[in-house]
């Protein structure tokens, strides 16, 4: 179980959109901080607003290996983060450092993280037919939150205030002690197809509609959470992640997947997107969509636990305490609180979201838009707070596009995104970050990077 916990931490700390909202598989979207509903067209509309495929700007557009990674925290400032990194490198934590970290990690947003990659994507747009797009996408998302009890137990052991209220050996419940604690991570492999076309054509108004479908292969899932008195705890991991399931192989409820294949998914699902977009007098754009409607069903290498009460562990509260002890303590807390056992099947909702956007095109070289995104459920991988952002694309030169804006929400602070792209009629190259200040700010440090260098277009763009 420790390896499963560390796997979730790895998703959060290394792979990590932040944010689920910021589509890191598109460098142009990342450069606007995730503002996209009225901007994206061609294959970029997949998973955002399939209606936009009806107004694609190229006959054929495709990309290979376009993506990015990012992570952010509201729990730490730069001083605390440096102390945390130093402790990890030196494998040493003094009691004073442990107290500081316990206080810092008591947060609803210890970490929001994600990685997003389009291995390939292509779209085709033909007159009267509309636009059709397909893609393959790798997506890893995570969210970590600790309440005071969990954070103090992890860093302080028996020095935690909890041991003044309860005695070691006393029976307590996860829902009683760890309300607000969440460790969530997921990794999926998506196969997408989407279609959109014009459905109303008037002199001053064009309306487009579209729908998308995705077949999802679940590679990994982890959740340990206690929210509003409800405890959820389950995990599943593909054989490619090399988790040891030896203790469960003889249980008839355990369906073991040990296939020696490239991916070997342990869950499968189906998702749907629907969207509408409109152009008003060829200048104003409006978009509304609902994405990721559906479920995942996990059936292999699946473990689940129930909150049946546990006894507080007797832990060491001495001054001698190193970084590995904090990881071991997290394992001890979860292993003491919950006993994981095999189950045959588990269904989870996809992270369904409502997306809305309004944009204005000012000539041929300036476009501005505002996006609002709201989570419609609490599924693994969904944003923890509403997202709102203002995005801007400017072309000071015909071959150079600058993207920027300001965004907030989705478990993150105010961000100042920045991106640039070299744009020709047939080729684009670009790099971006969703917050240019994140690596340098004292509070809420983080970082993100997205890049695409194999993006091509065929056919004369249409004037919108």
Image (cartoon, rainbow, N blue to C red):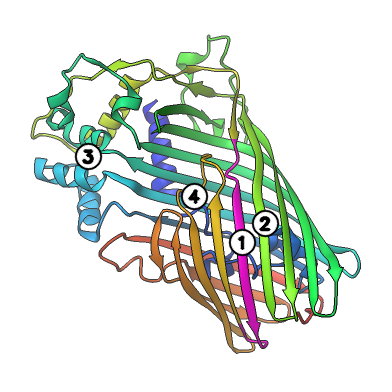
What residue is at 74 percent from the left and 80 percent from the top?
282
Foreground: disc 2 or disc 3: 2
How many angstroms separate mark 2 from mark 4 (CA)?
A: 16 Å
Say whether disc 1 or disc 4 marks the residue closer to the N-terminus: 1
Element type where label 4 sits in the image: loop
**Residue at the spot of label 1:** 356
Rate crowding at label 4 as few (under 14), some (14 to 19) or many (20 or more) other CA atoms within 10 Å. Answer: many
How many angstroms separate mark 2 from mark 3 (CA)?
A: 45 Å
How many angstroms separate mark 1 from mark 4 (CA)?
A: 15 Å
Foreground: disc 1 or disc 3: 1
How many angstroms separate mark 2 from mark 1 (CA)?
A: 7 Å
| Left or right of residue 101: residue 352 | right
Q: Nearer the viewer, residue 22 or 93?
A: 22
| Left or right of residue 353: residue 167 | left
Mark 1–mark 3 CB contact (< 8 Å): no
Q: Nearer the viewer, residue 114 or 91?
A: 114
For the magenta stretch, what is the residue range?
A: 349-366
Res 323 label: 3
Element type where label 1 sits in the image: strand
**Residue at the spot of label 4:** 383
**Residue at the spot of label 2:** 289
């Amino acid at each position: 179980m420790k390896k499963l916990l560390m796997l979730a931490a790895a998703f959060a700390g290394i792979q990590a959109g932040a944010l689920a909202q910021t589509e890191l598989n598109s460098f142009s979207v990342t450069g606007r901080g995730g503002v996209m509903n009225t901007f994206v067209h061609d294959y970029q509309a997949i998973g955002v607003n399939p209606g936009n495929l009806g107004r694609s700007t190229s006959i054929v557009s495709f990309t290979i290996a376009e993506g990015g990674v990012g992570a952010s925290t509201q729990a730490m400032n730069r001083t605390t983060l440096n102390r945390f990194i130093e402790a990890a490198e030196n494998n040493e934590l003094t009691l004073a450092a442990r107290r500081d970290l316990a206080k810092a990690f008591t947060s609803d947003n210890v970490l929001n993280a994600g990685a997003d990659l389009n291995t390939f994507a292509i779209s085709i747009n033909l007159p009267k037919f509309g636009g059709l797009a397909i893609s393959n996408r790798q997506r890893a998302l995570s969210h970590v939150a600790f309440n005071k009890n969990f954070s103090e137990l992890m860093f302080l052991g028996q020095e935690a205030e909890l041991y003044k209220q309860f005695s070691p050996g006393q029976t307590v419940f996860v829902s009683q002690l760890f309300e607000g604690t969440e460790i969530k991570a997921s990794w999926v492999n998506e196969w997408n197809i989407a279609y959109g076309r014009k459905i109303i054509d008037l002199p001053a108004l064009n309306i487009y509609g579209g729908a998308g479908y995705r077949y999802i292969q679940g590679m990994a899932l982890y959740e340990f959470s206690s929210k509003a008195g409800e405890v959820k705890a389950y995990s599943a991991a593909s054989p490619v992640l090399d988790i040891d399931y030896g203790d469960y192989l003889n249980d008839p409820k355990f369906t073991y997947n040990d296939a020696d294949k490239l991916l070997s998914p342990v869950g499968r699902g189906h998702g749907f997107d629907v969207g509408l977009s409109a152009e008003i007098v060829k200048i104003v754009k409006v978009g509304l969509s609902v994405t990721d409607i559906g479920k995942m069903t996990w059936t292999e290498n699946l473990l689940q636990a129930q909150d049946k009460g546990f006894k507080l562990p007797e832990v060491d509260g001495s001054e001698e305490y190193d970084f590995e002890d904090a990881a071991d303590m997290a394992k001890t807390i979860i292993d003491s609180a919950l006993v994981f056992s095999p189950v045959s099947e588990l269904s989870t909702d996809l992270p369904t979201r409502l997306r809305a956007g309004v944009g204005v095109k000012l000539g041929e070289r300036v476009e501005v838009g505002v996006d609002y995104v709201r989570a419609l459920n609490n599924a693994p991988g969904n944003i923890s707070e509403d997202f709102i952002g203002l995005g801007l694309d400017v072309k000071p030169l015909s071959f150079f596009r600058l993207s920027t804006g300001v965004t907030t929400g989705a478990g993150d602070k105010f961000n100042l995104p920045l991106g640039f792209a070299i744009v020709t009629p047939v080729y684009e190259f670009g790099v971006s970050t969703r917050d240019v200040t994140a690596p340098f700010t004292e509070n809420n440090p983080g970082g993100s990077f997205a890049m695409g260098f194999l993006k091509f277009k065929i056919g004369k763009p249409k004037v919108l």
